[in-house]
Image (cartoon, rainbow, N blue to C red):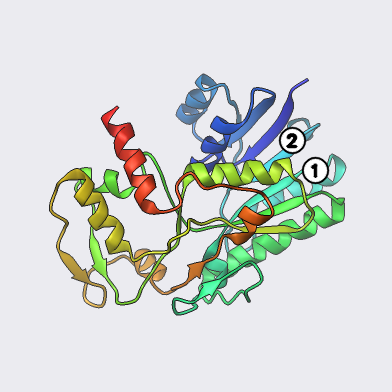
Amino acid sequence: MSKKILCLGFGYAARALTRQLSGEWHVIGTTRKPDKAAEMAAEGIEPYHWDGRELSARLVANVDAVLISTGPDDIGCPAARAAEKVFAATPPGWIGYLSSNGVYGNYNGAWVDEDSPLMAGSRRGLNRIAAEEKWRSIAAAMNVPAAIFRLPGIYGPGRSAIDSIRAGKARRIIKPDQVFSRAHVDDIATTVLAALSRPTKNAVYNVADDEPAPPQDVIEYACELLGVAPPPEEPFDTTDLSEMARSFYADNKRVKNDRIKNELGVSLAYPTYREGLNAILAQHRD
């Protein structure tokens, strides 16, 4: 008999996880878009049209695992609001919540781990903290294993510096001493699967590669691989950026990933952006 995983929000990371799940898993993914539902069905995913409000008891019945990747809003987590009552009646076997390392806020380039104080100052970061707390409380009330995954900048095929350069959209924005952590989407999927295979109550995992780096370094390396000149440097203080894009530069930290290695036995396929970009370029050439 197959196991069943429900993905509340079927985005980039959930799709990557699906590719790594064994054939014993039946995957249900939510979407609002009919064209995406057709794509999911073609890939063997059972699509479920969900408008962000109530979830049916039939949908969550006998679910072995739930992965939540929907973002929070200013009044909480829509998925938690929809799921809390129906999960109380039919608890899942495991809960995973894809959060963000934005919960840590700004550390001026210092390292953070899962025990570092959460100092988010942005509304987006505070909403993430509230969503994490809500899912912890839901899992605790049901006595269900749960894991929070604090994700960095996600990249992979179709969403990388290689792709942005080829599309003519790459920018080399320079902010002195600024670094970001990042992770290849397949390493994120590997980590989620490892946690699902070792269910623990109230677990928190940073997911990141081994080398936080300035964003311009990634662009320059991708240009080198492609044999093209990098885009011109743009000083952060004077360049034209959207409010959302500018807000990402407000936080500066390096994210430790020791726990996923030591507790889950994760071995990163792409320990730095270099391995990741080389693999993406090889896929483009294939």
**Amino acid found under the numbered disc labelled 2:** Ser
Q: Which residue is more in the foreground, 72 or 168?
A: 168
Q: Position of residue 160 (x, y in %)?
A: 34, 47
165 to the left or right of 29: left
Location of residue 87 (image quadrant): top right
Which residue is tagged 1? 86
Q: CA distance from mark 1 to mark 2?
A: 7 Å
**Amino acid found under the numbered disc labelled 1:** Val
Say whether marks 1 and 2 touch (CB < 8 Å).
yes
Location of residue 190 (image quadrant): top right
116 to the left or right of 155: right
Query: Is residue 272 visible from the viewing direction of this image?
Result: yes
Q: Which mark is residue 56?
A: 2
Q: Position of residue 25 (x, y in %)?
A: 68, 27
Q: Please report the residue visible at 35 percent of the width from the left and 68 percent of the height from the top.
A: 243
Q: Position of residue 213 (x, y in %)?
A: 37, 64
